[in-house]
Image: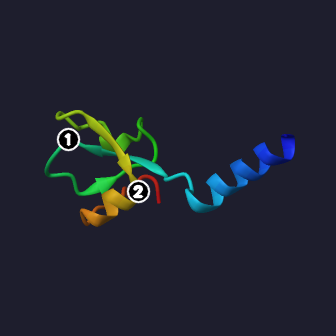
Amino acid sequence: MKATIILFFIFLTYFHPVETKVYICGPTGAKKYHYNENCRGLSACTHGTIKTSLTQAQSYGLTLCGWED
């Protein structure tokens, strides 16, 4: 039984890797993404931060914040 559970988690990890989450400022106009929700690059954000996947942020053409690279 334990072996079955272990194999199940290995299967999930292999075929469904955990997506990295990032933060962006507001629903529109963001230019950068941030790994840290408290990044100083987000300090001027007045639209609220949105948590999204790294893949999605990059598909919007966003690049990593200069404070975090």
Of callouts 2 and 1, which one flags the residue occurring earlier in the amino acid sequence?
1
Residue in the picture at 41% in, 48% down: 22
* Residue 41: x %, y % from top left: 33, 45
Q: Locate residue 5: give its quadrant.
A: top right
Residue in the picture at 14% in, 52% down: 29
Name the residue beneath numbered marker 2.
54
Which element carries disc 2, helix, strand or loop? helix
Q: Is residue 26 left or right of residue 9?
A: left
Q: Is residue 47 left or right of residue 6?
A: left
* Residue 49: x %, y % from top left: 28, 37
Q: How is the image coloured?
A: rainbow
Instruction: Give the Cα distance between marks 2 and 1.
Output: 15 Å
Which element carries disc 1, helix, strand or loop? loop
Near-viewer residue (65 or 49): 49
Name the residue beneath numbered marker 1.
26
Q: Is residue 35 left or right of residue 42?
A: right
Q: Locate residue 45: give its quadrant.
A: top left
* Residue 13: x %, y % from top left: 64, 54
Q: Locate residue 17: give its quadrant.
A: bottom right
Near-viewer residue (12 or 51): 12
Identify residue type, mark 1. Answer: Gly
Mark 1 is surrounded, within 10 Å at the Cα level, by few (under 14), some (14 to 19) or many (20 or more) other residues, namely some
Q: Are marks 2 and 1 in contact (CB under 8 Å)?
A: no
Residue in the picture at 42% in, 35% down: 38
Q: Which mark, residue 14? A: none
- Position of residue 6 relative to residue 65, above or below, is above
Residue in the picture at 32% in, 57% down: 57
Identify residue type, mark 2. Answer: Leu
Label total for image: 2
Q: Quadrant of the N terminus?
A: top right
Which of labels 2 and 1 is toward the front?
2
